[in-house]
């Protein structure tokens, strides 16, 4: 099928490349010229395992193209994905200006033929109808432009004005395993009221639904859930809010464990074995971050507020997380007492392993607070240190390896559980430090091994 993906970030580029990989003809549109230039040369502007490989094979097979020209994408695609960012506004609500620009842009470039316009971005509930309206506005603007020169007349909209449908197809991929998740989704949600549009979306995803590209082909077909627009939009927010709340829950229990002397890793195992609870997302630590949990939970709280409903549980999940993001600081103060004049080394900067994404990373709060308290901050991150993607980072000296990081530090904080951190030479690192304190912000390291290496080991809730 012919596909256009507008916005080539973590979601759009992965979606475009994976759809091209399974045989569709894809044009990816982005208004960032630098990115488009890079992608045309076969390079991915983001670090995502497996992405460069499938991009390059799709380029070679001629299944994918990159452009800044939205009109080329819109006329190519029978299915048009909107995959631009929806970052948070200071009020907590979602900033939908990029979606708005793209929806109008699609309308302004529709040139006949039935199109399915797909909201892949996470958008506030009700956005499906709003996008339809904006596309219609775009069509009207197009008509006005055509008649410009004389007085802008309000002529009847062109015949094809109604020849599109809007579908909500929320994305559930995780950064760091985005390609895997796209080929192995737990479910595909399709919200909309047009059977024709839903059928086209089912055809698009058929190879994924039938597990042709899954790592385990013996699994049953991927469930496809067809819903109305608003329910699909709500599923996305509810899923992220549930997962974030689950983490806040385990962090709350971890803090109680700290006080009563229980071990949260054993507690999480014990409750996770209950199939009604499940073992995933019970990893206690320094809180959830990233480009989506914080903004999506806040946006849902904001939506509830708009309807006069106070989402108390979600607000509590957010406030537990805000406190948790500073738990490493508390532990550092307990171990070192005064932080002024001390040097603290951060193992990891990104909000989770296997990504280069620093958006709303707990490391950023830590750097800011440590600086405020007069500590010097150094960091080593397997990706940020090596790719030089240090833009926007201030108040931190980025080291090129873990031993340089340890050298002269009074404490280390493991912020991101990169696999590489499981087999560093910790005994050597401890010797290089002024005080060998290890705050394991992800409960990732083995406490006994750390003690044998010479560290005072402090986990979260253990
Ligand atoms: N990052 C993630 O893991 C996930 C993100 N989402 C949602 O997907 C959406 C996209 O998120 P990301 O991919 O992380 O965003 P991103 O910020 O990485 O990428 C957005 C892209 O859109 C481009 N763009 C902005 N305005 C444009 C325009 N007018 N025309 C063409 N391109 C334009 C930007 O240049 C950028 O490349 C958001 O709504 C997010 O909540 C959903 C699931 C997972
Ligand atoms: O909407 C989105 O953007 C995505 O948000 C999350 O994916 P992602 O943010 O990439 O990463 P997660 O693995 O969910 O981790 C999010 C945060 O929670 C933290 N976390 C996760 C799991 C856990 O047990 N404990 C914990 O503290 C991580 O360290 C990280 O800071 C969801 O898992 C995806 O399904 C969703 O599509």
Image (spheres, grey):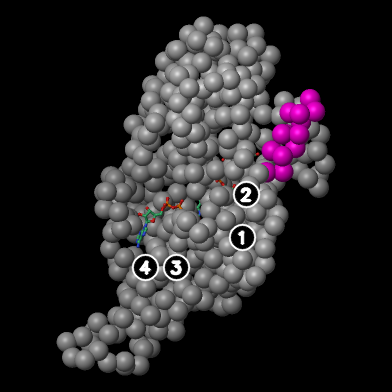
Which residue is disc 3 drawn over?
79
Could you say where residue 273 lies in the image, as x and y percent from the top left?
Answer: 80, 38
* Chain-order first, disc 3 or disc 4: 3
Could you say where residue 303 lies in the image, as x and y percent from the top left?
Answer: 59, 66
Which residue is disc 4 drawn over?
101
Which residue is disc 2 drawn over?
318
* Residue 421 colored in magenta in the image: no
Could you say where residue 118 lies in the image, as x and y percent from the top left?
Answer: 48, 67
Q: Do the residues labelled 1 and 3 touch (CB within 8 Å)?
A: no
| Cβ at disc 4 under 8 Å from ligand 1 | yes
In 3D space, how far apart are the residues under numbered discs 3 and 2 (Cα atoms)?
36 Å
Which is more foreground, mark 1 or mark 3? 1
In 3D space, how far apart are the residues under numbered discs 4 and 1 (Cα atoms)?
25 Å
Q: Which secondary structure, mark 1?
A: helix
Q: Residue at x 67, y 67 (%)?
A: 309
* Chain-order first, disc 3 or disc 2: 3
């Amino acid at each position: 099928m012919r596909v256009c993906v507008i916005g080539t970030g973590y979601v759009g580029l992965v979606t475009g490349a994976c759809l091209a990989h399974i045989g569709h003809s894809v044009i990816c549109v982005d208004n960032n010229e630098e990115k488009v230039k890079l992608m045309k040369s076969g390079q991915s502007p983001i670090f995502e395992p497996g992405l460069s490989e499938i991009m390059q094979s799709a380029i070679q097979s001629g299944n994918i193209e990159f452009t800044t020209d939205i009109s080329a994408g819109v006329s190519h695609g029978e299915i048009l994905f909107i995959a631009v960012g929806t970052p948070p506004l200071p009020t907590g609500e979602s900033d939908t200006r990029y979606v708005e620009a793209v929806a109008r842009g699609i309308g302004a470039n529709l040139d006949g033929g039935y199109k399915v316009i797909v909201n892949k971005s996470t958008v506030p509930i009700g956005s499906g109808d709003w996008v339809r309206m904006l596309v219609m506005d775009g069509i009207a603007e197009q008509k006005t432009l055509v008649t410009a020169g004389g007085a802008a007349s309000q002529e009847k909209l062109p015949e094809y004005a109604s020849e599109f449908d809007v579908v909500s197809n929320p994305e559930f991929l995780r950064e760091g395993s985005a390609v895997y998740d796209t080929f192995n989704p737990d479910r595909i949600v399709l919200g909309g009221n047009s059977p024709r549009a839903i059928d086209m979306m089912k055809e698009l995803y058929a190879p994924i639904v039938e597990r042709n590209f899954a790592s385990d082909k013996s699994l049953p077909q991927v469930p496809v859930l067809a819903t109305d627009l608003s329910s699909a939009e709500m599923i996305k927010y509810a899923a992220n809010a549930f997962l974030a709340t689950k983490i806040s829950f385990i962090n709350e229990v971890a803090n109680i464990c700290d006080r009563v002397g229980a071990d949260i890793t054993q507690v999480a195992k014990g409750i996770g074995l209950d199939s009604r609870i499940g073992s995933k997302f019970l990893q206690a630590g320094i809180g959830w971050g990233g480009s989506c949990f914080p903004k999506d939970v806040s946006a849902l709280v904001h939506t509830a507020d708009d309807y006069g409903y106070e989402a108390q549980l979600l607000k509590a999940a957010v406030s537990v997380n805000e406190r948790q993001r500073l738990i490493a600081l508390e532990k550092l103060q307990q171990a070192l007492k005064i932080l002024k004049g001390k040097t603290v080394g951060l193992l990891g900067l990104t909000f989770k392993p296997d990504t280069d994404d620093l958006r709303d990373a707990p490391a950023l709060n830590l750097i800011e607070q440590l600086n405020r308290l007069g500590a010097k901050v150094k960091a080593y991150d397997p990706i940020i240190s090596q790719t030089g993607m240090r833009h926007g980072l201030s108040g931190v000296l980025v080291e090129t390896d873990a031993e340089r990081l340890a050298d002269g530090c009074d404490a280390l904080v493991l912020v991101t559980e990169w696999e590489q951190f499981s087999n560093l030479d910790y005994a050597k690192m401890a010797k290089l430090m002024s005080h060998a304190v290890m705050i394991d912000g992800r409960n990732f390291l083995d406490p006994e091994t750390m003690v044998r290496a010479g560290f005072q080991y402090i986990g979260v809730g253990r």
